[in-house]
Image (cartoon, rainbow, N blue to C red):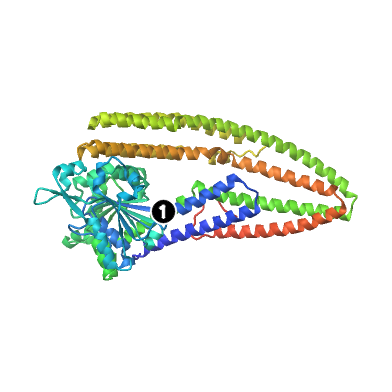
Amino acid sequence: MDVQSFYRQMADYVRWKSSLSTQLSAFLCWYKTYQPADATALRCLRQALQTLNSDSFLLVLVGEVSRGKTELINALLYPQYDCKLLPSGPGRTTMCPTEIYYDPLEQANVLRLLPIETRRSSATLTSFRRIPKHWVSVPLDSSDPTALAAALQRLAQVKRVTTEEAHALGFDLGHLKAASDGLWEIPAWRHALLNMDHPLLRHGLRLLDTPGLNVLGNEPELTLSNLPDADSILFMLAADIGLSASDTQIWRDHIKPMAEETPERVLVLLNKMDNLWGEASGDQAQVSANVRASTARALRMSEDQVLTLSARQALQAQQQPNEELLQFSHLPQIEQQLAQQLIRNQEHLSSSVQVTDAIQVMQNTRKLMKERLERARQEREQLRKVLDSPAQSAAQINSLRQQVRHLHQLYRRQSLDLRAYQRELERRCEAMRVPMAAFHLEGLINATYEEMLKSWTFVGLGRVLGKFFEQLHQRSDRLRLEVQAANESLLRIYENARYHRRNPQEALARRFDLQPYQRQLGLLEQQAREFRRSLVTMLGLRRHRAARFMHTLGQEVRTINNQLQEKLDGWVESAMTPMLQETEQQKETLDSYLKQMTQLRQQRSEQWARVQELKQELAVQEAALSELDHIITSAQATPAAPLPDGASLA
C-alpha cells in the first residue's frame, strides 16, 4: 500500500458522501415538486443532508514533546507542497496545540495564533474562538513552499519568563527548558488554528497536534471535548526511550478512557524505530515484534493496535523519493489502519438514524406514488365504462358510496386513535423533560462552581466533583425510568393498535435510546477525574485553572443535555411516523374515492373532460415516478455505500 492510500480512501469517502448527498438533494427537490408538504418527511431529509455535509474525520496526535507527532503530520501532508510544512526537529517543533483543517467559509491559508497570556483568564478556548481580536493572523503563501514553511516557524516560537510568570501561566517547571539567565522558555502561543487548502483537508480531514503534558494538563477542552470527539487517536511514543513516566501519565489521564470505550479508535505508534533497527544485531522484524509486544502488555492493549514507525524515514522517503525507504518506515501500515477507520466511519454514517430515516422516506414515497398511479388508472377506466355504458353509472356510484362510508369510518377511527397515541407519548415526553430541565442543570453547575472556588485543593476538588456527578447520575437514573415507561407505552401502542397495522418491530426500531448519552456522561466523569489528578499533581492547583476546568466541564454537560433535548423534541413525531403515514394514506385514498363519486355524478361532457385531465395527470405522475426511480437507483448504486440490513431502496 503506497503513500497515496490514505488520500484515495479519503477521496472515496468524500465521493460517497457527495454522491449520496446529491441524490438526497435531488429527491428533496423532487419531493417539493410532486408531493404535498409533509413536515416530518422534510425534516428527515434535511437532517440527513446536514449530517452528510457536516461530517469530518478528526485525527488527534497525542504524546510528549519530541515523540515525532509533527514529523508524522509533515509526512502525511508532504505530497501537496513538497516541503516540510510544520517546524519539527531538535529545538524547533510546534509548541502549542495546533488544529489543521480546511474551512471554505473562512479565509484559506491563514494561521491564527492565540497568545499564551490568555491563560491568565478562566475563559475557555471556545470562548476565545468567538473573539477574533485576541488572535494574531498570519497570511500564508501556498504557492511558495519555502515562504510557507518559514511563516509556519511561528508555531515554534518561545518566550522567556520568570518562575512566577511560568507558574501563573500554569507550567510545570519540570517540563520547561531553563535559560542561562534564570528565566524559563515557554511557548509564545496558547493555541493555533491553521486553515489550509490541501487535498486531504479539503476532503474533511482535521488534524490536532497536542504538544505534551504541559498543554494537556492546562487545557481541559482538549481532554474533555477534543479527545472524546476524535475519530482516531494516535498516541506517539519513542521506541528508543520506552514508556516514560510522563508517557504513562498521559496514557492514564487522557487516553486510556477512550481506549477502553472504543479500542479501535486508538493506535499506539512506536516512533523512531530506525534507532533500534540500526542498533539491532538480529532480525529487525523480530525487534519490532518484541517492542510491540512489551508495549501492548504495559498498556494492556491488543498488539494489533500497537504499530512501529519511523516518521523521519517516511518524510525522507518522500523527499527523495524512495519507495523502499517508505516501506521500511512503516508509514503505509499506519495509513492502512487510518483507512480502515474511515471505512468504519462510513459504515456508521450509512446506518445512522438520519440516513436510514431519509431512505425510509424515499421508500414510502415510491410506494405511495405507485398506489396513487393505480387509483388514477382505476378512475380513468371507470369513467370510460360509464361513458361507454351510462346504465352502469348508478351501480358504480352505489359501490363507491359503500367504499367511501367504510373508508371514512376507518379514517375517523385512525385519526382519533392517532391523536390519543400522540397525547400519551407527549405526556411521557413531559415526564422525561423534568429531570432534563435546563434551569435545574444550570443551578447545579453554578452551585458546583461556587463550591469548587471555596474548596480548591486536591481533596476538595475531588469531593466537589464526586457530588456533582452523583447528582448528574441521579438525574440520569430518573430519566432512565421515564424513558423505560415511554418505550413500554410505544410498544403497547404498536402491539395493540385497533385500526392501524400492528407492527411491534416498528416500535423496537423507534425506541428512545438513552444509552449513548449515558456512555457520554460516564466517559466525561472518568475524563474529569483523571484531569483533576493531572491538574493538581503536575501543576499545583491554581484558582483560574480550576475555574477554566469547571467552565469546560459545565459546557460539556450542557452539550450532552442539549443533544438529549433535541432528540426528545422530535421523538414523538419520529416514533409515530408509520401510523401517521398510514393515516395520511387513508385520507388520500378517501379523497380519491370521493372525487370519483363526484365525477360519476357529473354530465358526460364533464366526464370526458375528467378523462382527458386524468390522462395528463397520469403522464405527469408516470414521469415523476420514472424520475424518482432514477434517483433511488442512483442512490442505491452509490459506490462503497454500505446500507444497513433491511434498508434496500428497491
Front residue of 302/608: it is: 608
Quadrant including the N terminus = bottom left
Res. 314 in view: no
Q: Is residue 297 left or right of residue 106?
A: left
Where is residue 166? Give x, y as percent: 17, 44
User: What residue is drawn where x is 26% and y is 71%?
Assistant: 320
Decide: is 437 above or below 309.
above
Front residue of 285/54: it is: 54
User: What residue is drawn where x is 52% and y is 33%?
Assistant: 429
Q: Which amino acid is tagged 1?
A: Ser
Q: Is residue 182 left or right of residue 56?
A: left
Question: What residue is disc 1 on?
Answer: 56
Front residue of 438/300: it is: 438
In the image, farthest residue toward the right: 391
User: What residue is drawn where x is 14% and y is 43%?
Assistant: 163
Front residue of 66/487: it is: 66
Res. 509 in view: yes
Q: Is residue 62 left or right of residue 200?
A: left
The quarter of the picture where residue 588 lies is top right
Q: Number of numbered discs present? A: 1
Label 1, secondary structure: give it.
Answer: loop
Where is residue 113? Give x, y as percent: 28, 53
Answer few, some or many: residues within 10 Å of disc 1's Cα (few below 14, many 20 plus, some between 14 and 19). some
Decide: is 228 above or below 284.
above
The quarter of the picture where residue 551 lies is top left
Where is residue 376? Give x, y as percent: 75, 53
Quadrant including the C terminus = bottom right
Where is residue 131? Give x, y as percent: 34, 47
